[in-house]
């Protein structure tokens, strides 16, 4: 990465880290973008340059390109549903290394109506990323398979969060995806 790209990535991470810290301390609705900007030592305009909405400070991650790349690299003759499910499960290795961060983020999404409402949009974007990774397949089939797998993955995340992160996320995710894939 170039120096400019490295700085952009660091700024984005700092903004998101400070936003999560403030949201957890003060609540999502009580925290302003101006407070996030001040905590990250950037302007509000810089926050919006990296994150178009307040909700995207929580919901945006770098997981979609990871899943899409994994879907692309799976065997072409593998059934679409299995290809997507395996990619989601493999992609767990790319999630934040500290499960407490993921647990806090998941709880924040589940307990904040504005974030819960945007979760569908987030899953839709993931479906689109998966469909783009499989241009040679029937788009309807890909979207149905991706939707089913993402519903299973979301249900697994909810179960994991409800269990306070005590269960192994990979095991819960594998169990949920197995329900879908048979």
Image (cartoon, rainbow, N blue to C red):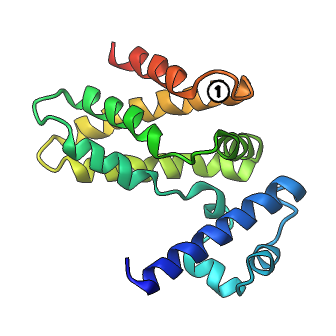
Q: Position of residue 4 (x, y in %)?
A: 45, 86
Whether 13 is drawn above or below 156: the answer is: below
Query: Mark 1 packing: few (<14 Cα in 10 Å), some, or many (20+)?
Result: many
Quarter of the rendering containing residue 98? top right
Which residue is rendered at x = 62% and y = 79% of the image?
Answer: 48
Q: Position of residue 13 (x, y in %)?
A: 60, 68
Give the left or right position of residue 125, taking residue 43 as reference: left
Tally of numbered discs: 1
Figure quadrant of the C terminus: top left
Whether 59 is drawn above or below 76: the answer is: below
Q: Position of residue 16 (x, y in %)?
A: 66, 65
Disc 1 marks which residue?
A: 160
Q: Position of residue 56 (x, y in %)?
A: 61, 62
Quarter of the rendering containing residue 34? bottom right
Which residue is rendered at x = 46% and y = 38% of the image?
Answer: 92
Give the left or right position of residue 103, taking residue 86 as reference: right
* Mark 1, secondary structure of its residue: helix
């Amino acid at each position: 990465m170039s120096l400019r790209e490295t700085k952009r990535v660091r700024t984005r991470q700092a903004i998101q880290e400070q936003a999560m810290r403030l949201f957890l301390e003060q609540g999502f609705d009580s925290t302003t973008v101006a407070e996030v900007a001040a905590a990250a030592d950037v302007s509000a305009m810089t926050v919006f340059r990296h994150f178009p909405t307040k909700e995207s400070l929580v919901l945006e991650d770098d997981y979609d390109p990871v899943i899409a790349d994994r879907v692309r690299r799976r065997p072409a003759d593998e059934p679409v549903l299995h290809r997507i499910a395996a990619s989601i499960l493999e992609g767990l290795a790319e999630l934040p290394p500290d499960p407490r961060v993921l647990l806090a983020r998941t709880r924040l999404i589940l307990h904040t109506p504005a974030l819960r409402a945007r979760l569908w949009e987030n899953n839709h974007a993931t479906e689109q990323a998966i469909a783009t990774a499989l241009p040679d397949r029937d788009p309807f089939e890909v979207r149905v398979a991706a939707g089913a797998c993402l519903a299973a993955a979301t249900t697994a995340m909810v179960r994991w969060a409800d269990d306070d992160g005590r269960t192994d996320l990979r095991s819960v995710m594998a169990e949920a995806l197995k329900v879908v894939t048979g």
